[in-house]
Image: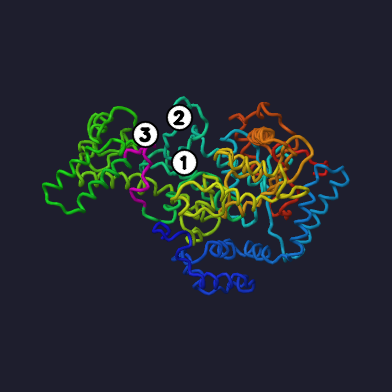
């Protein structure tokens, strides 16, 4: 519906959506499970009739179990005066770096008192389990995460993570765990190859650790049914389902750049030729032939006399080769000339990228006897070839893997809970959007138009980056920060978000939901409290000083760790975990069981990121 020019909210029924919101505001109705049947039937069938916030609240109130239902209901009913008291306490924390020990301790005590007062309004508390994880090489943290999710998937308690040997804990550290796991799942040398190759690695960068992901995002690597790697791939996808479901239920996200097509497949949508790899990517030749097919289909729709139709169809082969290869640079070539020059002849009816291979190691045939058949500039042959590639890459070759992902989600909460959302909404809720735009909710209309307007981004930053302490909206250093955020490319914007919120992606609601605050700091270095989503900023006088300070903070954050010591720029990273110690590191995840059932506050202390220097009480 949003692809027909109607916009994100084009078909929302305001009256129906408001009626659902009123029902969800009634705690007795929710707690007793007395919602009318239509509340559960209509949103999965017609999600576009209800506003996204109302569908999201419906899931939080009825999709994750009674303990989580009560938690969300209580969060909505906290006394506004106590919320204001908490805000004042957080604002006082903005001066903590300028305080002596006693004053700093009083500021921390005020914050804890405000949080305890809010806790006092709750009937009960959402129980939490703390898991201690050893930070190390990618294989080590993935092994630990897999063991942890296998043990904790069916546990209804909230999961919090603390890294062994690091002082920080709380919301920011747990989000940092999900971010670290998401990054390690993008390693190029991963022994479990889940993702379709992108082919986007720049020349001379073959040594890079992580996959280069394009705007489309990651999609499943198609596999033959008897492929020996299938069991390991399915186990990894089941783990990913557990991980993303656990993160969603507990209020976190996993910033893995999965494509919208992945979530469309999860929702049971039938993928078509438009989801083939982009031109220039591995397998992009299939998209190119699909475009040629569209040209031939357009000729057929004109219902021309046979002779004229044949001439126009033949003319398609004489179109510029940029239809197949938009980045081609060289002598002018037609489509037919390019295919012959690149392949030697028109390709056979086999996997054009060799992603799926048969028992002999040869590319899988698209149809029986496909190795003996050749494609040609013919509408019927092209349609058969393109549809066979779609069937292999987007349907049969990935069905087993996506089923494993569904089983993983189902271990945490019923997978049909997600049917209340569109594939695009699921992508933003579970992963966030790859492109960081400093505006509100990113609509499909915006995605089609392209870049956001600079003035819209500036207005959003000025409105939603909240100064606290002695900083004001007109402070020079805050203006310098906003100017720098606007000038940043996407990679540096992601680093800024990871520094302040432990997540390189904006939440589904965009910048307004990120809750980023900026406080003054008397010392020379930038640091951040990820739990409070607060950036502590020295009083820089120039844009160059600010940029240099941010680069140092980004470098410190990239080295990893939620700890209390500053790591100077350029100092070597902490030693990586050797493969010999991987088993011992994985066993560290089992420590979750040692504290299972322990009741802990949602935020006992503020974990510190990128070179923090807190009072001794922290």
Depth check, mark 2 against mark 1: the one in front is: 2
Magenta residue span: 271-285
Q: CA distance from mark 3 to mark 1?
A: 36 Å
Q: Is residue 214 left or right of residue 385?
A: right
Residue 106 lies, in percent from the top left, at 85, 50
Name the side, left or right, on which 57 lies relative to 115. left
Q: Residue 446 appears at what percent x and percent y? A: 48, 52
Picture residue at 51% right of the left edge, 56% below the top: 410
Residue at position x 51%, y 38% in the image: 186
Left or right placement of residue 362 versus residue 419 in this view: left
Q: Is residue 280 magenta?
A: yes
Classify 10 Å Cα crowding around label 1: few (below 14), some (14-19), many (20 and above): some
Asked which colour scheme the image uses, the reply is rainbow
Going from the N terminus, do you reach mark 3 or mark 2 first? 2
Q: Which residue is mark 3?
A: 327
Q: Do residues under tags 3 and 2 come within 8 Å of each other at their CB atoms?
A: no
State which tag comes first along the sequence, 2 or 1: 2
According to the image, label 2 marks what residue? 202
* Quadrant location of the C terminus in the rendered image: top right
**Is residue 308 left or right of 444 when viewed as pictured?**
left
Res 22 quadrant in image: bottom right
Pointer 2 local density, CA inside 10 Å: few below 14, some 14–19, many at least 20: few
Give how far across and how far down residue 421 sits, in percent: 49, 59
Q: Quadrant of the N terminus?
A: bottom left
Between residue 60 and residue 523, name the one nearer to us: 523
Of mark 3 and mark 1, the one earlier in the sequence is 1
Callout 1: helix, strand or loop?
helix
Residue tagged 1? 232
The reply to whether residue 27 is visible in this rendering is yes
Of residues 10 and 564, the one drawn nearer to the viewer in this rendering: 10
Horizontal and vertical percent for residue 297? 23, 49
Q: Is residue 544 above or below residue 72?
A: above
């Amino acid at each position: 519906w949003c692809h027909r020019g109607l916009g994100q909210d084009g078909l929302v029924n305001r009256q129906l959506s408001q009626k659902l919101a009123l029902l969800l505001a009634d705690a007795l109705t929710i707690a007793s499970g007395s919602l009318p049947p239509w509340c559960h039937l209509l949103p999965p069938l017609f999600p576009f009739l209800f506003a996204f916030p109302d569908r999201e609240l419906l899931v939080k109130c009825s999709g994750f179990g009674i303990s989580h239902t009560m938690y969300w209901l209580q969060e909505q009913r906290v006394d506004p005066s106590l919320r204001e008291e908490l805000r004042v306490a957080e604002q006082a924390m903005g001066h903590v770096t300028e305080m002596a020990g006693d004053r700093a301790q009083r500021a921390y005590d005020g914050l804890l008192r405000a949080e305890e007062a809010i806790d006092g309004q709750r009937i009960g508390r959402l129980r939490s389990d703390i898991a201690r994880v050893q930070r190390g090489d990618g294989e080590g943290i993935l092994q630990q995460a897999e063991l942890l999710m296998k043990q904790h998937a069916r546990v209804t308690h909230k999961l919090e993570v603390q890294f062994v040997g690091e002082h920080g804990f709380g919301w920011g550290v747990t989000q940092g765990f999900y971010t670290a796991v998401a990054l390690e799942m993008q390693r190029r040398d991963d022994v479990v190859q889940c993702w379709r190759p992108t082919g986007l690695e720049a020349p001379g960068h073959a040594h890079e650790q992580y996959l280069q992901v394009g705007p489309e995002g990651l999609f499943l690597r198609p596999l033959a049914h008897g492929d020996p790697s299938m069991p390991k791939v399915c186990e990894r996808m089941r783990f990913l389902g557990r991980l993303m479901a656990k993160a969603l239920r507990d209020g976190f996200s996993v910033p893995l750049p999965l494509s919208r097509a992945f979530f469309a497949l999860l929702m049971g949508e039938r993928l078509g030729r438009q989801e083939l790899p982009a031109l220039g990517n591995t397998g992009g030749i299939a998209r190119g032939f699909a475009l040629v097919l569209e040209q031939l289909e357009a000729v057929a729709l004109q219902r021309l006399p046979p002779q004229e139709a044949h001439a126009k169809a033949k003319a398609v082969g004489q179109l510029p080769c940029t239809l197949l290869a938009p980045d081609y640079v060289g002598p002018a070539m037609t489509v037919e000339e390019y295919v012959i020059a690149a392949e030697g002849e028109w390709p056979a009816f086999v996997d054009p990228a060799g992603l799926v291979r048969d028992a002999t190691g040869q590319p899988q045939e698209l149809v029986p006897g496909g190795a003996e058949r050749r494609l040609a500039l013919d509408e019927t042959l092209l349609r058969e070839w393109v549809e066979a590639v779609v069937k292999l890459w987007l349907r049969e070759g990935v069905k087993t893997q996506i089923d494993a992902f569904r089983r993983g989600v189902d271990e945490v909460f019923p997978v049909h809970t997600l049917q209340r959302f569109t594939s695009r909404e699921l992508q933003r809720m579970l992963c966030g959007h790859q492109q960081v735009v400093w505006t509100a909710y990113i609509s499909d209309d915006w995605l089609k138009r392209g870049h956001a307007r600079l003035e819209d981004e500036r207005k959003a930053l000025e409105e939603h980056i909240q100064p606290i302490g002695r900083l004001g909206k007109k402070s020079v250093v805050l203006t310098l920060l906003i100017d720098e955020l606007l000038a940043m490319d996407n990679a540096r914007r992601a680093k800024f978000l990871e520094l302040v919120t432990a997540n390189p992606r904006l939440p589904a609601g965009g910048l307004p939901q990120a809750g980023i605050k900026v406080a003054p700091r008397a010392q020379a270095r930038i640091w951040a409290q990820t739990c409070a989503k607060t950036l502590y900023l020295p009083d820089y006088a120039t844009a160059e000083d600010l940029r240099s300070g941010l680069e140092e903070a980004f470098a410190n954050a990239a080295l990893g760790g939620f700890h209390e010591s500053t790591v100077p720029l350029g100092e070597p990273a902490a030693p990586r975990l050797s493969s010999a110690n991987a088993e011992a590191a994985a066993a560290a995840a089992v420590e979750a069981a040692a504290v299972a059932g322990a009741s802990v506050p949602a935020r006992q202390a503020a974990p510190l990121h990128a070179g923090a220097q807190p009072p001794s009480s922290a």
